[in-house]
Image: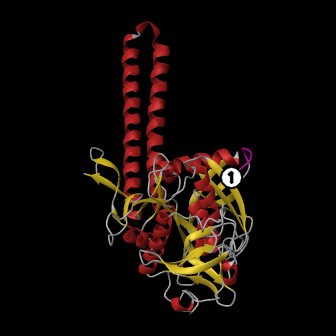
Amino acid sequence: MGFTAVHADWGRLDASLDDLGCGRAWQDVHRVEGLRLACPECGGRMFARVSSRRARHFYHHQRPPDCELANESPEHHLLKLELAMAARAAGFRAELEVSSATGNWRADVLVFDEHGRAFMALEAQLSPMTPDDARMRTDRYARDGVGVCWVGLQGRPWQRAVPSLRVKYPEERGAGWTVRHGLARYTWAPRTLAGKAGWDHITCPLGDAIRWILQGRVHPHAGPAGTVWWTAPAYADLAAARARLEADADAAARARAAEQARQSDAARAKTAEQDRRPAAAHASAAERRLQEALLQAQERRAEQERLAIFLEHAGMDAGVWAAFTRLVRTVSGKTVEYGGQSPAHGNGLLVYSRSHPGREFRLAGVVCPDPAALAGWPAELTILVPSQTWLARIQAAARTPLKVAVLNPTTSHCTFSRIRPQSPVSPQAQARPENRT
């Protein structure tokens, strides 16, 4: 069974909407003799009816074995409806069982912004799926500028790879669905290195979680082990502050170790009366090591302070930024230097490179520019981003052809894309069925 059907004259019908999404009443389709409705997935004949739980839906006259809509479980059916109702309660237009214009995906629930553009898919995922499949299907949405939140009932490995929620089925009729995993807060008290810090998953009503996601109050965040969850920007900033403090403490510890080494070298030099010159050289080397360690610590602190505003803008903490810069150097194969944030390039961080020593550094790319600055972007200036989420934002804002490199610091996976300006999807194209994978 499904929530949608197609009428030859009225177009697409949605049983979860009072006007069926086409200005008709339920009485126009329920128990109407001679009415012909078709499945948007397989084209088979459908009829309208009401379930024992008073849920309006469409069912096949003869259930085809290979139609996904015809073979959905009752749990999948109810969760899909709950996601649509939660999105509408948050003030957004949400449609059930919507296919892309190219037929490369079909969303259980597709949510639209105030301009009528699709921006988020809510997927009820109760059947098995591998982490690679989850990433592939998430990337497929991202290429069309659509984010996705996967919702399941049980803990699965794929939930660590993509933005997802694990929910609990209502135990009593009339009770609400509950989020048990997938939303997290960062706790750190007291805010010193001695304070205990870590991510804790929180429980809340499913409707609250969907509202926070659609309103942009929470965003996908990749933890230290690469696990993805939803969290507020303030918690991500707090985790980044803790990482910076740990980096400073680590640099200070290395400096103390270098000082201890210098003192040990000096003590050995005093007792080596018979070989003063080698001992003096050893002490000099230790002094140089100390100076180098102190200089490196100062440079790291200065770099972290200089990049603090940019890291907040890009949504990266200090540890992720270090992995990202190493990946940039590895992929480019050139000497790379970073400039400052450029207001002329959407406050992105400038990246310069040179292929051989002695040659001039040239502007090679910009890290995480504000998508609002892409209208007049130079076609050959590469945009560097750390995640598919950033790629989706760039794609959604593209107005001219763009070159984008996605350098994932968690997986060390690199992809390069040439993005064309996006064109809006017509309602007629959205209504066409697709072969869902």
- Position in image of residue 231 (x %, y %): 41, 61
- Position in image of residue 139 (x %, y %): 62, 60
Residue 34 seen in render: yes
In percent of the image, x 52 and y 60: which residue is there?
A: 125
In the image, residue 302 sits, relative to residue 111, either above or below, namely above
Magenta stretch prevailing secondary structure: loop
In the image, residue 211 sits, relative to residue 228, either above or below, namely below
Q: Name the residue under label 1.
A: 353
Q: Pick the residue in front: 96 or 53.
A: 53
In percent of the image, x 74 and y 45: which residue is there?
A: 356
- Position in image of residue 180 (x %, y %): 37, 58
Q: Pick the residue in front: 23 or 180.
A: 23
In percent of the image, x 44 and y 6: which residue is there?
A: 274
Label 1, secondary structure: give it.
Answer: strand
Residue 185 in magenta? no
Which portion, as a residue range, is magenta?
A: 354-358
Decide if residue 170 is on the left or right side of residue 44: left
